[in-house]
Amino acid sequence: MLTRPLTQDRPLHALVLPPGPELTDAVGRALDEDGPAVLPLSPDLPPPALEAALRALRPTHLVTGGRTRPLDDGVGVADEVAVVIATSGSTGTPKGVQLSGRALKASATASLRRVGARPGDRWLCRLPHSHVSGLQVLVRALLCGTDPIFDADDASAHHVSLVPTQLRRLLDAGADLAAYRTILLGGAAASPALLAEARAAGARLVTTYGMTETCGGCVYDGRALYKVDLKIGDDGRIRVAGPVLFSGYRFGPDPHLEDGWFVTSDLGELRDGRLSVFGRADDVINTGGHKVAAGTVAHVLTEHPRVREAAVAGRPDPEWGEIVVAVIAGEATLDEVRGFVKERLPAYAAPRAVHTVPAIPLLPNGKVDMVTVRNLIRHLGVEADEPGRTTA
């Protein structure tokens, strides 16, 4: 539920802590309103990045390894806010998403209900706790009445949340994926080949869609969680409503709302209550007057047997306005890529340039680092002889 706070009296503690009991206890007390709100930050942040986050989000205290010290110019949060998650988006400037304890618990409860988790079940946390995906693993564990597991070698875990890159690495390592009752898979779109391979290995996968503003995954296997509502606007963007919504951004800007519906930046389609996500609205490429959803093209490319990972973006072009450019991890040639896409999408959606890289750059939360991808594509636009570049 989105609200405009009238007071900001609750302290906000920036937690620069490794995974462990101190972190879990602080999160639990924040959820139960027995302690200050928390801003979890990665202990691996370089000093300049940490200073930038503290400067932008202005917590009242800094907690590092058992030591709590007040910060100058710190500002508290509204009483309902339990957690602030720092998210950089595409600008690199830290922005704080404020989440209430009520919203976080509603999300975690609906998740546990969907996967059939029981009291006493244990959750393995292998995602950064400074992101909502990792934080929600802690919340689910707390609601199950157990401590989260941070040791990947601990065989007592019943459930785990992963991103596709982690799942790929576990498959390559021959891990026993059938040992988990549930593997929640989110953060980025997974290729059909990866899903099929994991399921053939015994993995019980549940694909998820959501964002920090919805307390993480709010759609499982295309279906909205309990009490979450979805609709598609005339602009094609996905709208979300329900008790899992955030309480606004710290220090603004105002949330993009329409009569209580949060307007996401993602394009999608609803058919018989099942959501398909096409990609971000700002990733639409206008080529020759035709609009191409970059995420859709990238998803199609990952179905090619010689493409492991893919990212797609537009590059300015004097004739077409923009051209579709693919960055792939794999061995497929430009001709193979264009032919494959043309069999599944309109011809104008086929990439006109392909660049091969060892691996697609990712953010810490497992999503494709589109800033780096676009910078690479922009560089290729002026370096015509760049190794690995092919055009048509």
Image (cartoon, rainbow, N blue to C red):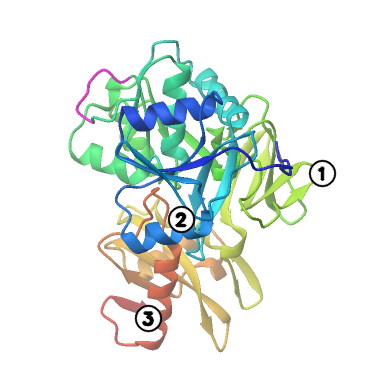
Q: Is residue 172 above or below residue 300?
A: above
Q: Amino acid at mark 1?
A: Asp
Q: Earlier in the sequence, mark 2 or mark 3?
A: 2
Q: Position of residue 58 (x, y in %)?
A: 52, 53
What whole-number distance in Å separates the C-alpha atoms at marks 3 and 1?
A: 44 Å
- SS at circle 1: loop
For disc 1, the marked residue is 259
- SS at circle 2: helix
Q: Amino acid at mark 2?
A: Leu
For residue 155: magenta?
yes
Q: Are marks 2 and 1 in contact (CB under 8 Å)?
A: no
Give whichever of 342, 202 is nearer the camera: 202
Magenta-colored span: 152-157
Give whichever of 370, 11 is nearer the camera: 11
Q: Position of residue 332 (x, y in %)?
A: 31, 64
Instruction: Kindly identify the residue that appears in the image at 67 percent across and 30 percent down.
Output: 243
Residue 392 visible? The answer is no
Q: Position of residue 296 (x, y in %)?
A: 53, 56
What whole-number distance in Å separates the C-alpha atoms at marks 2 and 3?
A: 36 Å
Quadrant housing the N terminus: top right
For disc 3, the marked residue is 380
Q: Is residue 107 above or below residue 270?
A: above
For disc 2, the marked residue is 54
